[in-house]
Image (cartoon, grey):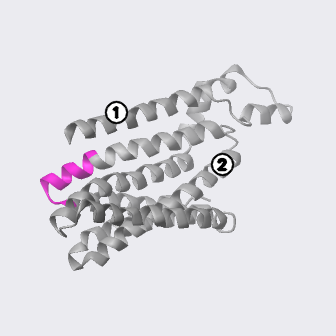
């Protein structure tokens, strides 16, 4: 298990490193410097540098809030998926086939929700949708802790996980594009790469912190801790105008 976990962590770290590299290699679709040129303003070397572009992106509160939402949502996914295998075996006595079927509920929920959420993001406030995904993910962690009430609670947990992930992925990408335009950052590719890095980091931090808390206290504590982060971040995302 340790070797498998280390291998998975290594793959995710490599993915994160690759995304960081692409932030420097991929050209922006329409940069803030091009906007300045269109308005007839002077563009300095500092404006056009990668460091300056990255600094503008990383110093934007709204961009960081959306990126953080991606991180914490995937942190919950990262801790629930491995723990669920242990819980379904130890507490419900399920075979591997049945455990796989239960976890696949999240995949089906994601498959159904993502297209609808993408359609909805064109008609509803995108910050509200991202905040909703955070609330749904915290609800998923709550139902995980309530699994002693019956297997239905666990089914609800994984279903909400898939729904929350579908809502967050489709709406957060659209919101990032809106924020890049609003603040004239111009770096679409860098914003998307930053989101991908947060995705990978969340899948690393979630299992590491969540499983450690699960070993020290209980499985529910680790999951609830990650879910609490989602709930705390929801008002911050909701405040984005």
Q: Residues within 10 Å of mark 1 (few under 14, many from 20)?
A: few
Q: Is residue 154 left or right of residue 196?
A: left
The picture quadrant where one finds residue 233 is bottom left
Q: Is residue 101 left or right of residue 96?
A: right
The residue singled out by tag 1 in the image is 10
What residue is shown at x 67% (from left), y 52% (from top)? 178
Q: Can the viewer see residue 196 in this picture?
A: yes
The picture quadrant where one finds residue 127 is bottom right
The total number of labels drawn is 2
What residue is shown at x 34% (from left), y 72% (from top)? 155
Magenta stretch secondary structure, dominant: helix
What is the span of residues highlighted in magenta in the rendered image? Answer: 208-219
What residue is shown at x 16% (from left), y 60% (from top)? 218
Residue placed most toward the observer, 195 or 64: 195
Label for residue 144? none
Mark 1 element type: helix
Q: Is residue 9 left or right of residue 107?
A: left
Q: Position of residue 224 (x, y in %)?
A: 28, 62
Q: Position of residue 221 (x, y in %)?
A: 21, 61
Q: Is residue 213 magenta?
A: yes
The residue singled out by tag 2 in the image is 177
Q: Is residue 204 above or below residue 216?
A: above
Mark 2 element type: helix
Furthest residue in direction left, as rendered: 216
């Amino acid at each position: 298990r340790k070797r498998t976990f280390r291998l998975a962590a290594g793959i995710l770290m490599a993915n994160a490193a690759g995304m960081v590299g692409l932030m420097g290699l991929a050209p922006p679709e329409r940069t803030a410097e091009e906007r300045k040129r269109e308005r007839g303003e002077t563009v300095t070397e500092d404006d056009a540098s990668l460091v300056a572009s990255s600094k503008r992106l990383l110093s934007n509160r709204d961009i960081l809030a959306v990126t953080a939402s991606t991180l914490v949502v995937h942190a919950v996914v990262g801790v629930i998926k491995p723990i669920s295998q242990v819980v379904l075996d130890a507490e419900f006595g399920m075979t591997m086939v049945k455990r796989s079927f239960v976890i696949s509920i999240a995949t089906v929920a994601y498959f159904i929700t993502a297209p609808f959420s993408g359609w909805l993001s064109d008609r509803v406030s995108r910050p509200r949708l991202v905040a909703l995904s955070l609330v749904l993910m915290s609800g998923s962690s709550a139902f995980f802790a309530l699994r002693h009430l019956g297997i239905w609670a666990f089914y609800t947990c994984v279903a909400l996980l898939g729904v929350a992930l579908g809502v967050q992925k489709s709406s957060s990408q659209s919101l990032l594009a809106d924020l890049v335009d609003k603040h004239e950052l111009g770096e679409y590719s860098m914003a998307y790469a930053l989101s991908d890095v947060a995705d990978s980091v969340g899948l690393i931090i979630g299992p590491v912190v969540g499983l450690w808390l699960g070993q020290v206290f209980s499985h529910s504590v680790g999951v609830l801790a990650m879910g609490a982060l989602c709930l705390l971040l929801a008002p911050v995302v909701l405040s984005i105008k």
